[in-house]
Image (spheres, grey):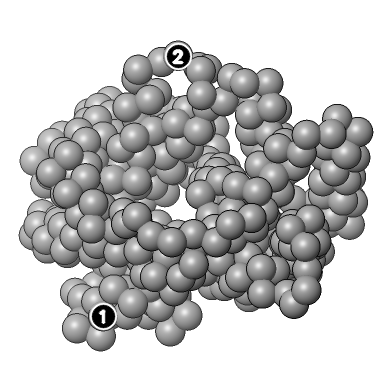
Amino acid sequence: MVDAFKAVASQLIVLHHLAFYGPLSDGTYLLAPDLVAWFSQDARMAVQVFLVVAGFLAARSLAPQAILMTANPMAQLWQRYVRVALPYVAALLVAMVCTKLADHWMQHDSLPDSPTVWQFVSHVLLLQSLLDVDSLSAGVWYVAIDFQLFALMLLLLWLARRWPEASSLGRRRLTHALVWAVGLASLFYFNRDADWDDWAVYFFGAYGLGALAYWFSQVPSLHARRWRMWGLVLLTLLALAFDFRTRIALALTVALVLAWSLRKGWLYTWPRSPVLAYLGKISYSVFLLNFPVALVVNAWFTRYAAADVWVQTAGVLVAWLACNLAGAAFYHLVECKLSRLGRPRASQTVPA
């Protein structure tokens, strides 16, 4: 189920970038204006799927019983940075080369400016949005936000575990309360103000829904589990009644599907699709590389292909295929090798 969500969401993000950036989509728009407009504006909501899934998986890996397991949170945070940032930095280098190549073939507003040393360093530190530095590639802001969210979740879990004289049950309840508090603050305030969209608190509503969905689906008591899940639904619906946002409604839906599938036992067994499984596996690499690869394809078609709407539409399809092939190659040749450096070593854990 998780792989399927990641597969579909990553493909929607690729199609969003293809519709939003580059000249090829202008020709496709003439053939299918409604479809291209939807991909250009609405398909980006697939980011909410990534946010909910990330919260769900963070809860499962960091605190499956809602109590932080690692004895060294800072080491865990560093491992997360290494695992996420090393492939990301490699992809940035590829993006800079692709931008230079695309710039040789076309002039277009979607081409990033020539990078500076400071711009690259700010990206490596995952601070580009906070420092108001121009992005080297579309979508890389999410990597920084994902790391912020992981760090914030780690902090909340650490605070709950550090509470003096609390029993295991008390710490679990405190974990739920802290995640609820920050999640509701996000849903009712931060997520309603786009000025906060460079910070984790803007997105923590969706991320927290994923984490709480995991923990609540694990509650053994049927009555308590239903009470918590209904609370999750009702409070989120209250936030939507206060200020309706389609992205939050989507996040709630994904969280409920994950919780239901985990509880019913088909989270790991459905859908049985090797294609979705593989696309989910390479989704991070596809996410990282799709924009620069699409730029190169756009530039090549602009320079050498006919200015015909059917040819341009074929160019969009070629770019979509190229993004996936490049992502697959990057996954096997780069991400797999670099991500091994960020895998947690056998270390002491704190008993629940």
Judging from the image, what secondary structure is the residue with disc 1 in? helix
Q: Residues within 10 Å of mark 1 (few under 14, many from 20)?
A: few
Up-down: is 321 above or below 80?
above
Residue bearing the label numbered 1? 121
**Looking at the image, which is closer to me, 146 or 244?**
146
Q: Nearer the viewer, mark 2 or mark 1?
A: 2
Mark-to-mark CA distance, 2 and 1: 42 Å
The answer to whether one can see residue 87 in this image is: no
On the rendered structure, is 31 left or right of 334?
A: right
Nearest to N terminus: mark 2 or mark 1: 1
Residue 37: image x %, image y %? 52, 39
**Looking at the image, which is closer to me, 120 or 108?**
120
Judging from the image, what secondary structure is the residue with disc 2 in? loop
Residue type, mark 2 in image? Arg
Up-down: is 274 above or below 211?
above
The answer to whether one can see residue 17 in this image is: yes
**Looking at the image, which is closer to me, 175 or 311?**
175
**Looking at the image, which is closer to me, 136 or 162?**
162
* Residue that appears at 64% across and 55% down: 352
Residue type, mark 1 in image? Val
Residue 107: image x %, image y %? 20, 61
* Residue that appears at 21% across and 45% down: 336
Q: Residues within 10 Å of mark 2 (few under 14, many from 20)?
A: few
Quarter assignment of residue 294: top left
* Residue that appears at 15% across and 57% down: 94
Say which mark, if any, is on residue 272.
2
Quarter assignment of residue 69: bottom right
C-beta proximity under 8 Å, tags 2 and 1: no
Say which mark, if any, is on residue 282.
none
